[in-house]
Image (spheres, grey):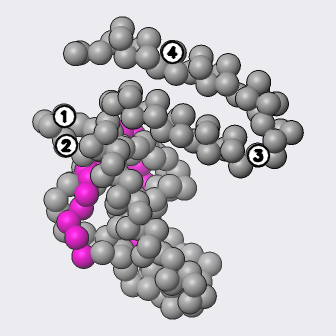
Amino acid sequence: MAIINPENQVLERRAVPKGSFIIREGDSGNCAFLVQSGKVRVYVQHDDKDVELAKLGPGQIFGEMALVFDEKRSATVQAIEDSVLVVITRQTLDDKLRKSDPTVRAIVPMLMKRIIQTNSALINRHGDIKILVETVQNIYETIIVTLPRVQQQSFENAVQPKLNQFLAAVQSFQEKYSDD
């Protein structure tokens, strides 16, 4: 199947049945996929366990790093519903980047590198409540110190109780369901 995008380029579509593997971690790749319909699961193997990175649905893209870097696939993607995917090749991306502003051309590879770093951090920290708590507290503190002094108390009164409830619920969940 094929569809035509606004620039009159024909883009390939693939029908993928539920349960099918679309990308496997470690494979080489040269294209990305846009989910036109259905849903897919993105995960990696870490310590002999599947670590889910995302569930993606219509309008979302996966495999995008293969459009910029000549590296092995960093995750496995499996259809969790019957899906239709639009194939995005390097050539398609290159054509679009050539037509874009030089700043955009410079930003795309930098953003991709940051995505790789973030995914790596997620994999290595998966399930660590202590890091979650520290991250949430750092974000809270960063926000409060950037506010004008007259707004700090109001922010603290509005956010701190809810933040404490959230962290207590996460801690309780971990204690109740943790395998440790």
Residue at numbered disc 3: 147
Q: Is residue 5 left or right of residue 78?
A: right
In the rendered view of the protein, which quadrant contains the C terminus? top left
> Which residue is farthest front?
149
Q: Nearer the viewer, residue 52 or 159?
A: 159
Compared with 32, 23 (above or below) is: above
Residue 90 located within the stretch drawn in magenta:
no
Residue at numbered disc 1: 49
* CA distance for labels 4 and 2: 28 Å
Query: Sequence order check: which comes first, mark 1 or mark 3?
Result: 1
Q: Position of residue 127 (x, y in %)?
A: 33, 30
Residue at numbered disc 4: 169
Query: Sequence order check: which comes first, mark 3 or mark 2?
Result: 2
Q: Position of residue 153 (x, y in %)?
A: 79, 30
The image quarter containing residue 132 is top left
Query: Sequence order check: which comes first, mark 4 or mark 1?
Result: 1
| Residue neighbourhood size for the residue with mark 1, other residues' Cα within 10 Å, grouped as few (<14), some (14–19), many (≥20) | few
